[in-house]
Image: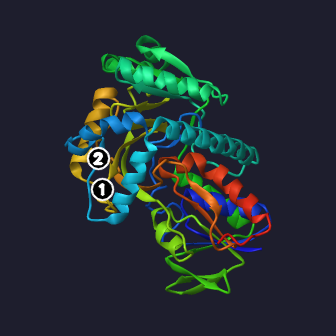
Amino acid sequence: MKVCVIGAGVIGCATAYTLQKAGHEVTVVDAASAAGTETSFANGGQLSYSYVEPFASPSTFFSLPRYLFGASSPVRFRLQADTRQWLWGARFLWACRRKRTLAGTNALLALAQESRAALESWMNEGELAFNFARNGKLVLCPDARVLASQAAQVAAQAHAGVRQELLNRDECVAREPALRHYASRFAGGVWTPTECVGDSHLYCQALEGAARARGARFVYGSEVRRIVQRHGRARAAVTAAGEVEADAFVLCAGVGGRGLAASLGERLPIYPIKGYSVTLAMRPDSPPPTVSVTDLSRKMVLAPLGGRLRVAAMAEVVGYSRDVPSERVDQMLDAVETIYPGLCLREDTAPWAGLRPATPDSVPIVRRSRVPNAVLNLGHGGLGFTLAAGSAMRVAHLLGEPARDCA
C-alpha cells in the first residue's frame, strides 16, 4: 500500500519507519526536515514510560490562580482572543477531575508500555543510535503535600505493574549526589529505575535513515496545505509543489494537524502548550549528574545527554508564538545554578522553544478519521518522544485492518 505520512517530527518518523518495516511504500512530507527545529528538536530528552500523569489534574486545577497571575510561574495561562483556546481550556478544566486524571493515566501507561516494547525491539536490531541511556528518573517533590500526592499516584500506577520507589530527602541525595547542595529545597522524591533518556533529534534522524534504507521517500520543504477527497476517500496531500497521491494518509503534523484534520471533517481538541529548553556544557572538573531529574516545583527536566545537560522547562498556554524571551532563558539558567551550582557553563546555551500539540486530557488521538483511508496520530503533548513508537505500532495495526466508513 502507498502511504503518505504528513509530518517528520518524532511521531511522523516513527510512523514512517514502522510502516516501511511492515512492507508499505511510504512517502513522508514536511515543510522542514526530520525534527527540523520544531517540537521534536530539543525537548527534555526523557523517555518517561512510567511517569505519565496528565497535565490536567486536581493539583493543576487548584494551582490555576497562581499560574494565571504569577509573573515567573513555570506554568502560564494567558487568555487569547481565540475561541479555540477557550474551548480547549473548558475541556481542560473538565479533565482536571480525579476520575478523568486516573483514566488518562491508565491510557497513557498502556501506550507507554507498548512504546517501550517497540523501541527495545528496534534497538535490538542495531539500527538506531541517539544517545540512549537507561539511567533512571528522580522526581523531586518540594514539600510533604506534593510528596503525599505523588505517593497516591505511585500507588495508582502500581496496579499497572509500574515499579517506583518513594524516597526521603537523604535517599534522593544518595541516589544523585549532585543534588546535595539543593537538598533543602525538596522533601523527597519518586525514583523510577527503568526510565531512560535520549536525543529526540538524533532519534528522528536515525529513524529516517533506517526508513530510507528500506525504500521510504522523504519530501522536505513542502508544507501540506490540505488533503483532497474524492468519492469519500482521501486521494492527495496538496503542497505548493503539487499533489502527493497515496492509498492511505497518516496525519502526524503536531500543532498543524488540527487544521489539516479539518479537511477530513474532524474538529480536534488540540492546542499548543509551549515549552523551552537550553543545552549546556558541563565543566570537566565538576562531577556530572548521572540520573535524569524532574523538579516538580519548577516544572523542569534536567537530563544528562551525550555529555551535556539538557534542561527543559515551563508549560505555557499562550498561543502559537515560538519566541524565546530572555527572561525565560535566564530563569532556567539561574535554576540550574541553584540545583547544580558550578556545574554548567552559561555560554552557548542553545535556547529553544517548541509547541507541544496537547489534548485537554493529555491522551493522544490515534485512530482512523471520518475518512476511512486517513489515520490520525496527533496530540501527544509533552510525551511525543515517549509515545512515538507505540503510537506508530497502533497506526500500523489500523492500516492492516480493512478500512470501514467512519463517518
- In percent of the image, x 35 and y 23: which residue is there? 142
Label 1 element class: loop
State which quadrant residue 355 falls in: bottom left
Residue 158: x %, y % from top left: 62, 25
User: Where residue 360 sits: x, y (%)?
Assistant: 45, 51
- Drawn side of residue 302 relative to residue 162, left or right: left
The alpha-carbon separation of the residues under discs 2 and 1 comes to 7 Å
Q: Is 16 above or below relative to 283?
A: below
Above or below for 213 versus 248:
above
How crowded pointer 2 is (Cα within 10 Å; few <14, some 14-19, many 20+) is rated as many
The quadrant of the rendering that contains the C terminus is bottom right
Decide: marks 2, 1 in contact (CB < 8 A)? yes
Of residues 407 and 346, which is closer to you in this image?
407
Work out whether residue 287 can be spotted: no
- Residue furthest out toward the top: 170
What amino acid type is highlighted by mark number 2?
Answer: Arg
Residue 19 higher or lower than 351, as above or below = below
Task: Identify the residue at image location x=71%, y=46%.
Answer: 118
Image: 210 above or below 137: below
Callout 1, which amino acid?
Val
Q: Which residue is mark 2?
A: 76
Q: Nearer the viewer, residue 40 or 254?
A: 254
Q: Secondary structure at mark 2?
A: strand
Quarter of the figure with the N terminus: bottom right
The quadrant in which residue 242 appears is: bottom right
Q: Which residue is mark 1?
A: 318
Picture coordinates of residue 87 (x, y %)? 38, 59
Give the side of residue 125 with respect to residue 306, left or right.
right
